[in-house]
Image (tube, rainbow, N blue to C red):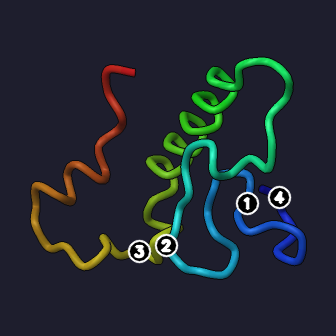
Amino acid sequence: MGNDPATSVVNRFGIAHEVPNLVVMGCSTLVSHGGSNPTLTLQAVAWRSAEHLVQNWRSIAGGKLSGTKSKKAKAQITAPMSGM
């Protein structure tokens, strides 16, 4: 995880540098973990990535809704996350 595509696969939000519209969420984005239980850290990283995706979906996906044309799908993608 990092800003330099030469030294990392994904950016700080888990979005792949080399593959468009690929987001890796969860413990796979961290190279290693410390001596203690990393659960809260992993949850925080996933939460931050999810919030970033919701707030910036149109620019991340190039203004497209991943091929879906359903009004319901569009509403779900553009609606703010609730209950969190």
The quadrant in which the N terminus is found is bottom right
Tell me the SS state at disc 4.
loop
Question: Foreground: 64 or 16?
Answer: 16
Q: Mark 1 points at which residue?
A: 11
Question: Which numbered disc covers residue 63?
Answer: 3
Q: How many C-alpha atoms fall within 10 Å of the one at disc 1: few (<14), some, or many (≥20)?
A: some
In the rendered image, residue 28, in percent from the top left (x then y), is placed at 63, 51
Name the residue tied to disc 2. Answer: 21
Rounded to the nearest angstrom, the CA distance separating label 4 from label 1 is 5 Å
Q: Is residue 81 above or below residue 10?
A: above
Q: Which of marks 3 and 4 is nearer the N terminus?
A: 4
Q: Which amino acid does label 2 sit on?
A: Asn
Element marked by disc 2: loop
Residue 80, by quadrant, is top left
Residue with the mark numbered 4? 2
Q: What residue is at 51 percent from the left and 56 percent from the top?
A: 56
Asked if disc 3 and disc 4 are in contact, CB closer than 8 Å, the reply is: no
Which residue is drawn at the image coordinates 56% and 39% (left, top)? Answer: 46
